[in-house]
Amino acid sequence: MTEETFGPTLPIMRVGDAEEALRLANDSPYGLGAAIYTRDVERGEQLARRVEAGAVCVNDALLNYLAVELPMGGWKASGLGTRHGAAGIRKFAKQQSLLTTRFALKREPFMFPYKARTSKVLFKGLRLIYGRGRRRSR
């Protein structure tokens, strides 16, 4: 797995142990984000600190997108980069966001494939937020 992919994808590769998985994950020209799933959260966080990526989630894949106060950018050939001001100076350092979910779900409720009920809730929520044919007062 050496090509950059954008989700939702979940590539799976059999490895001998966590060290081999880490070596293979870091053996890439890309490093936008990564996810580690484990029953041992402490070990997952230790491994996450060694992943060469701008954001690493433990037991979650999208938590970093909800943490809008965190910097977003990739390492290596990933991400949009930064320039000017403090961000321009910081681009010469490597920033990494490490997030661990406090309560893991067996399945992310809004990840594809949707169940019929989830799909209905999503569409109703989107219609409520964005409306459909709703007139806005000026």
Image (spheres, rainbow, N blue to C red):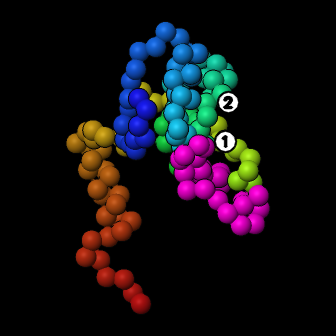
6 drawn magenta: no
* Image disc number at residue 49: 2
- Counting labels gives 2
- The C terminus - image quarter: bottom left
**Quadrant of residue 90 in the image?**
bottom right
Q: Which of 42 and 51 is in front in this view?
A: 51
Look at the image and tell me whether residue 103 can be seen.
no
Q: Bounds of the magenta span?
A: 67-89
- Considering only vertical position in the picture, is 109 above or below 88? above
**Residue type for callout 2:** Arg
Q: Is mark 1 on a helix, strand or loop?
A: loop
* Image disc number at residue 63: none
Residue 105, x across and y down, in percent: 46, 30
**Quadrant of residue 19 in the image?**
top right
Q: Nearer the viewer, residue 136 or 34?
A: 34
Q: To which residue does mark 1 refer?
A: 96
Tag 2–tag 1 contact (CB < 8 Å) = yes
Residue 49, x across and y down, in percent: 67, 30
